[in-house]
Amino acid sequence: MKSVISRYFIKVKDTFNIIQFQRKTNFSQPSRNATSFQKQLSKVFKFNLFKSKNKYDYSSPKENINFVGYSLLGIPIVAFALGTWQIQRYQWKLNLIEKLESRTNHEPIELPQNLEELDSKEYYPIKVKGQFLYENEFIIGYRGLLVDGKPPKNNILFGIEDAKRGYNVVTPFKVSDQDLTILVNRGWIPRSLKNPARRQENQIKDETEIVGILRLNERKPPFIPKNRPHGDMWFYRDVNAMAEKTKSSPIYLELKSNKDLQQYPMPNQTRVELRNEHMSYILTWYCLSGTTAYMWFRKFIRGIPLLE
């Protein structure tokens, strides 16, 4: 703006000098000076005071946007839609975490007579009384140790080394006063106790009352080997196959507590922590949408090359 004003005053000054010169020579050379004055004046005001030095003329209409241009416009639109979808996913995950914590902390309920009701009771604590049947016990591996439903912060806990590699012990449980046998995940054991003979001292022989978190059938997770029931090799919770193998009902509880937490298996192995990284996804998609929208506007509306 300062350069425009300075150029303006320079031209005015030149015009003033021309007029002064014409006054001095007006009486001696009237016709020739009048012609020269007109030429000088036309040169002065031929300059456009408001013309920008920018080589891109934004006032001129741009060429029509082609198919490629409209196709590239889909990038910020799709990114914005994905960011909005992640907001919905974020709210859904918060509700799921709240629901999970509410159910696991609920007062224990009795095992319903109509077992079909259990389909809507996952993560509820169930209270049952009966006796463990250790002869059909099996393990699920590998499993990391959970403390209060979360992985431990370090690998040395309660004297356990390498707490990320161990097993969960599943034992059939004969329910008292009912012709019903269910499956109970008694908890986590280290690799050193994989042999059943090494954990016999922790077995409860008498009738006992337990509280366990109800879990339903689990689909095979990706990158996990298939279960091999005939070889007693289990890698995920296929309740139906486990029940068929042990001649039990397809009811699976994860023991919530036992009488002595210093003994194995260590109960309370229900994972209650869920990953919630949707906020980072929201920021990523919205930033991508804003950046690509600006680049599209710069290229196709203002006509400025992206790499300049």
Image: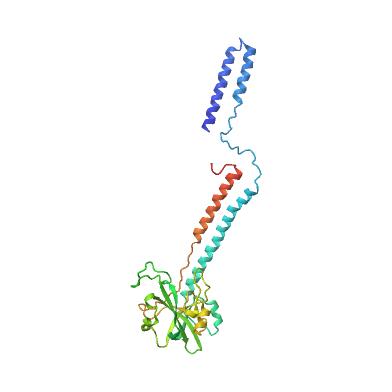
Q: Is residue 295 above or below residue 180?
A: above
Where is residue 267 shown, x and y percent of the image? 41, 77
Q: Position of residue 254 (x, y in %)?
A: 46, 78
Q: Quadrant of residue 149 in the image?
A: bottom left
- Give the image's coloring scheme: rainbow
Residue at 56% x, 20% y: name it: 16
Query: Which residue sits at x=56%, y=81%?
Result: 116
Q: Residue furthest top?
A: 28
| Residue at 61% over, 53% down | 74
Identity of the residue drawn at 55% across and 53% down = 289
Numbered circles on residues, count: 0
User: Where residue 23 sits in the image (x, y, percent)?
Assistant: 59, 14
As drawn, the residue found furthest toward the left would be 159
**Looking at the rendering, which quadrant does residue 302 occupy?**
top right
* Residue 72 horizontal/vertical position (percent): 60, 50
Q: Nearer the viewer, residue 143 or 98?
A: 143
Seen in the picture, residue 7 relative to 213 is either above or below; the reply is: above
Residue furthest to the right in view is: 64
In the picture, measured across the screen, residue 159 lies left or right of residue 239, that is: left
**Front-lying residue, 233 or 137:** 233
Q: In the displayed structure, would residue 57 be above or below residue 184?
A: above
Q: Nearer the viewer, residue 252 or 30?
A: 252
Instruction: Find the residue positioned furthest to the bottom.
Output: 177
